[in-house]
Image (tube, rainbow, N blue to C red):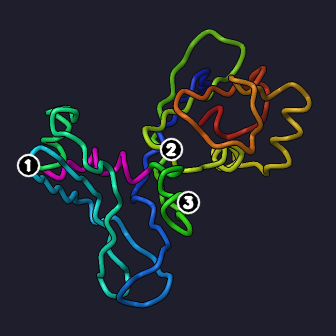
Amino acid sequence: MCFYDLLTYEIIPQETPNVIRNCSKCKRDTEFYCSEKFRVNANQKMVDVWVVYNCIHCEGTWNYPIFSRVHVNKINSNLYQKFMNNDRETVWYYAFQFNHLRKLCNEVSTNIRYELREKRLETNSNNLTIKFYCKYDFDLRIDKVLAEILGVSRSTLKKLELEGILMLNPKISMKKKIFDNLQITLVGKGLDFNVFHY
């Protein structure tokens, strides 16, 4: 039996979030998906940039504003080139700006498919540390993912926390959303969870 002291999990979304807003063609609120394309409009030295979304029913478009009437010299040249080339990573960055999207849409879907990419490392610690890496913020609750990893209920996680066996760093509620570099420590390695060993 091999015990592991450090588990790292990279949370990789498999899709961008859809949004719900009014479709001018369907004449009702409907769902839009990210086309993964920018629309750039340059009027002399003033630039507008949008991410293009399409209605899932009629393929009508909604333009999600990124820059509006901004002088071209105020946009980083590398970023501007990414807009022109429909750089996927840049599109995804804006597609996961939940707070901004919620101001412009009726709703933003948080039910996103994701992959957990695991790495196991041995150290000489008496505790187990679980560390999360996530490039995008997509409203994924800590207790949901941790329960999935450990194969226990959320109520069991709460009990472990109250008993001082499970600790979050920084110390926040497990109902909060996962963020990059979040660290969770399980004190001692005598707990009977499959995640500790093969």
Q: Position of residue 66 (x, y in %)?
A: 33, 50
The residue that label 2 is drawn on is 137
In this orientation, which residue lies closer to the viewer: 148 or 44?
Answer: 44
Residue drawn at x 48%, y 87% as measured from the top left: 28
Q: Position of residue 53 (x, y in %)?
A: 33, 68
Query: Mark 2 or mark 1: which is in front?
Result: 1
Amino acid type of the residue tagged 3 in the rendering? Thr
The disc, 3 or 2, on the residue closer to the chain's N-terminal end is: 3
Placement of 58 over or under 106, stated as above or below: below
Distance of mark 1 from mark 3, alpha carbons?
A: 39 Å
Residue range highlighted in magenta: 85-96
The disc, 2 or 1, on the residue closer to the chain's N-terminal end is: 1
The residue that label 3 is drawn on is 110
Residue drawn at x 40%, y 58% as measured from the top left: 16
Badge 3 local density, few (<14 within 10 Å), some, or many (20+)?
Answer: some
Mark 3 lies on a secondary structure that is: loop
Amino acid type of the residue tagged 1 in the rendering? Gln
Q: Which disc is residue 44 wearing?
A: 1
Distance of mark 3 from mark 2, alpha carbons?
A: 10 Å
Amino acid type of the residue tagged 2 in the rendering? Asp
Placement of 23 over or under 109, stated as above or below: below
Relative to 20, is 189 on the left or the right? Answer: right
In this orientation, which residue lies closer to the viewer: 190 or 62?
Answer: 62
